[in-house]
């Protein structure tokens, strides 16, 4: 799906400050931390804990959660392959704007297709996209089943369910590979924060 606007006679308007100048005034650059993994892997739980810890330490952070955005911005989309791609495209554009504004954007989405994640990466400032593979075995995700979705998918009540009747393309070289087995939520969050800082973001004042 093209990023070119359908509307005619539109132009991108630049502000009086470039990205580097804005970052200097805000005290640091923004980035997009993209959590991807199966449903029930812990993406949102870890992202929320990272958000809280970063905010408590003085960093500007905000979570974009897949379920929450489907209540509004993406409420018109289903779960077909095309709708999943459009879902991620929209979220990627929002994340890009928030990153440009200097936030650490914690995006928690199944985002099963590698091509969709690459497109988001290509739209973000170079080096500012940090992919976090929340690597939790399917059987663990299914045992949690917080929303009862796996049970419904196994019963054929939900079509196109990632990991059961639809594919999940795991990242081949994520910036952060989070293996959640045996780790507490706090340990997972600290591991992610260390990875974010290793890439030059959310540094302590």
Image: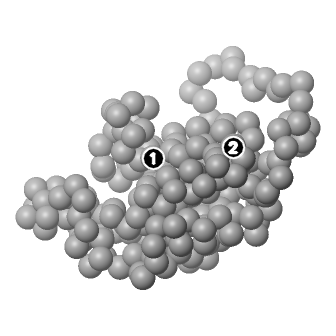
Left or right of 8, for residue 154: left
Q: Residue furthest top?
A: 9
Left or right of 193, for residue 47: left
Check contact, mark 1 vs mark 2: CB within 8 A: no
Q: Residue at x 82, y 26 (%)?
A: 14
Which of the numbered marks, if any, corresponds to residue 60? 2
Which of the numbered marks, if any, corresponds to residue 117? none
Give the structural element (helix, strand or loop) at label 2: loop
Residue 131 x %, y %: 60, 64
Q: Nearer the viewer, mark 1 or mark 2?
A: 2
Q: Using the image, determine if residue 181 lies above or below residue 38.
A: below
Left or right of 54, for residue 167: left
Left or right of 168, for residue 18: right
Q: Residues within 10 Å of mark 2 (few under 14, many from 20)?
A: some
Residue 139 x %, y %: 26, 79
Q: Using the image, determine if residue 182 lies above or below residue 198.
A: below
Q: Can the viewer see residue 13?
A: yes
Q: Residue furthest front?
A: 56
Residue 73 falls in image quadrant? top left
Q: How many marks?
A: 2
Q: Residue at x 71, y 48 (%)?
A: 59
Q: Using the image, determine if residue 171 lies above or below residue 40.
A: below
Q: Which residue bears the numbered disc 1? A: 65
Give the structural element (helix, strand or loop) at label 1: strand
Residue 175 falls in image quadrant? bottom right
Depth check, front residue: 82 or 73: 73
Q: Residue furthest bottom?
A: 182
Residue 179 x %, y %: 49, 79
């Amino acid at each position: 799906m093209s990023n070119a606007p359908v509307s005619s006679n539109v132009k991108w308007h630049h502000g009086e400050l470039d990205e580097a100048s804005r970052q200097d005034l805000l005290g640091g650059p923004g980035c997009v931390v993209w959590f991807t993994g199966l449903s029930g892997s812990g993406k949102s739980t870890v992202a929320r804990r990272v958000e809280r810890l970063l905010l408590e330490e003085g960093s500007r952070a905000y979570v974009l959660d897949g379920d929450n955005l489907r209540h509004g911005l993406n409420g018109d989309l289903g779960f077909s392959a095309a709708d999943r791609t459009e879902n991620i495209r929209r979220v990627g554009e929002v994340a890009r704007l928030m990153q440009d504004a200097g936030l650490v954007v914690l995006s928690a989405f199944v985002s099963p297709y590698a091509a969709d994640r690459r497109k988001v990466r290509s739209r973000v400032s170079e080096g500012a996209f940090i992919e976090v593979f929340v690597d939790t075995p399917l059987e663990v995700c299914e045992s949690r089943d917080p929303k009862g979705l796996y049970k419904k998918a196994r019963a054929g009540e939900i079509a196109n369910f990632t990991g059961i009747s639809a594919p999940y393309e795991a990242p081949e070289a994520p910036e952060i590979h989070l293996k959640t087995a045996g780790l507490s939520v706090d340990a997972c969050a600290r591991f992610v924060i260390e990875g974010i800082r290793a890439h030059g973001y959310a540094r302590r004042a």
